Image: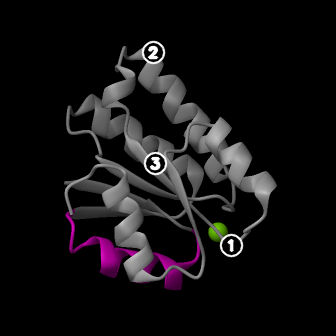
Amino acid sequence: MRILIAEDDPTSARYLEGLMSRLGECAVVADGEEALLAFAKALDDDRPFDLICLDIMMPRMDGQEALQAMRKLELERGIKPSREVKVLMTTALGDVRSVMSAYKGGATAYITKPIVSERLFETIRSLGIET
Ligand SMILES: [Mg+2]
């Protein structure tokens, strides 16, 4: 499967890429704007991502803004809800507010940092993605 990782912290990005590359082909970007561009390009190329790991706190455009823009784009492209990309929000903030607003923005699941591999893979399996 195709996976997009959006994470501004290089150490976290490398760590996530190391884990996620077991599941598929990973592309890594460092902010929400780049994530949105990569997402749109994948749709244009008819090679959409199957899963996006989206950090909430990023410069330029944060994860929640990027997610809203992605969902809007899917709607404009006539992508059915069942075909929407699965989005796993990653956040250092364990607080209810950021998690709730992530869901409102269309997140499929979230995971709090530090990311533990077992928890990550378990969460991905719960999304119904083959791992
Ligand atoms: Mg961050």
> Tags 1 and 2 in contact by the CB under 8 Å rule?
no
The residue lying toward the viewer, choosing from 120 and 44, is 120
* Quarter of image, res 49: top left
From the image, tell me which residue sits under label 1. Answer: 92
CA neighbours of label 1 inside 10 A, class few (<14), some (14 to 19), many (20+): some
- The answer for how far apart the CA atoms under marks 3 and 2 are is 18 Å
Q: Position of residue 4 (x, y in %)?
A: 37, 56
**Residue sitting at 33 percent across and 27 percent down?**
82
Q: Which SS class for mark 1?
A: loop
Q: Is mark 1 within 8 Å of ligand 1?
A: yes
Residue picked out by circle 2: 76
Q: Which badge, 1 or 3, is on the more N-terminal residue? A: 3
Tell me: is circle 3 under 8 Å from ligand 1.
no
Q: CA distance from mark 1 to mark 2?
A: 31 Å
Disc 2 on helix, strand or loop? Answer: helix
Q: How is the image coloured?
A: one colour
Task: Choose the circle earlier in sequence order: 1 or 2.
Answer: 2
Give the amino acid at mark 3. Val
> What is the quadrant of the C terminus in the image?
bottom left
Judged by its main secondary structure, the magenta piece is: helix
What residue is pinned by disc 3? 87
Tell me: 10 left or right of 40.
right
The secondary structure type at the circle numbered 3 is strand
- Report the span colored magenta: 8-24
Eyeballing the image, is 24 above or below 61? below
The numbered disc on residue 64 is none
The amino acid beneath tag 1 is Ala
**How far across and how far down the image is residue 12, in percent?**
51, 80
Q: Along the horizontal axis of the image, is 72 left or right of 74?
A: right
